[in-house]
Amino acid sequence: MRILGVDIGGTNIDIVIYDGDFHHVGSYSTSEVFSAGIDSFIEKIAEEVGAVAVGIGAAVWIKGDKPILAPNLPSIPQLDLKIPAVIENDANCFAVYAHHVFKLPNILAITVGTGIGSGIITNEELYRGDGLAGELGHWFVGGSEECSCGGKGHLEAYFGGRALKNKYGDVKELVSSGKVYSLKEFELFCTAVANAVTLLDSSAVVLGGRIGMNLMAEKVKEGIYRHLMPGFTPEVLALKDELAVAKGACLVCLKTLKR
Ligand SMILES: [Zn+2]
């Protein structure tokens, strides 16, 4: 059985196929695909590779089973595909793939890219709450900086890629030079993650996303442990795989089909 995994991001759409192993099909421009029609685009590729179902990970907020908001996409994907399809929040797909890789029962998975997403694995299962669980990026950390969601003072408005770029310029350089670790925004990030770990008692914090996977896990670990009560001992791991969301989307789809 072949499952197509699609990661719909703000800039790129990454596609993989899963047949027991993952294979990269291709990466495409989000704006071009949306203007040509996302449904027919996915259906065409699914047919070409012989996929029986599609898992979609997208930068959307899902409440119940419905996408309700997608501030970083050209529009909210309203998928009406001819083959079975499942849509899931991209950070949740990342968390599912992190669980597949690291096999730990309790994971707090965090993606730092343009924004900040997170997904929670608890006792081997993805935790959704009523759908929006794990929105660490929209955790109130103080101040009144405006956030992409319309709120103020949220973590993403300080430590998300867009916020860092607006304030400091070249984010790639900020991270590769290590300057990022002395920023007060990094401290805000570590404080929020430590608070989330205190709530969840995660076995591991797994970092991903364009910025997250390039942060030094050791530095993040030091930052988190500065705030943790003794007794909490999460590992901090980086998952360096740009296709992690697309791969997680395959696994989410597979699990839904087996139900
Ligand atoms: Zn927000």
Image: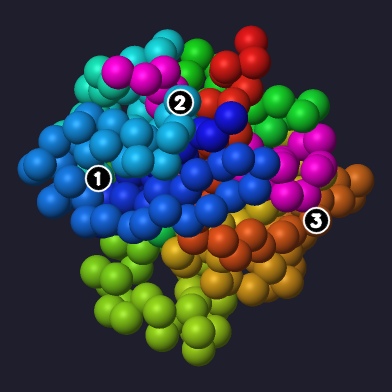
Q: Amino acid at mark 1?
A: Asn
Residue drawn where x is 10% and y is 42% of the image: 36
Let me know if residue 104 appears in the view: yes
The answer to which of 136 and 244 lies nearer the viewer is 244
**In the image, which residues are magenta?**
82-109
Residue with the mark numbered 2: 53
Q: Is residue 3 magenta?
A: no
Residue drawn where x is 32% and y is 50% of the image: 13
Q: Nearer the viewer, mark 1 or mark 2?
A: 2
**Could you give the CA–CA distance between mark 3 and mark 2, rounded to whole angstroms?**
35 Å
Let me know if residue 155 appears in the view: no
Pointer 3 residue Cβ closer than 8 Å to ligand 1:
no
Please give left or right for residue 12 compared with residue 223 in the image. left
User: Does residue 80 lie above or below 211 as drawn?
Assistant: above
Residue 68 position in % (x across, y down): 28, 21
Q: Which label number is shown at residue 72? A: 1
Q: Secondary structure at mark 1?
A: loop
The answer to which of 20 and 5 lies nearer the viewer is 20
User: Does residue 224 lie above or below 7 as drawn?
Assistant: below
User: Looking at the rendering, which quadrant does residue 51 occupy?
Assistant: top left
Residue 228 position in % (x across, y down): 77, 51
* CB within 8 Å, label 3 to label 2: no
Q: Secondary structure at mark 3?
A: strand
Pointer 1 residue Cβ closer than 8 Å to ligand 1:
no
**Could you give the CA–CA distance between mark 1 and mark 2, rounded to whole angstroms?**
25 Å
Residue 7 position in % (x across, y down): 40, 44
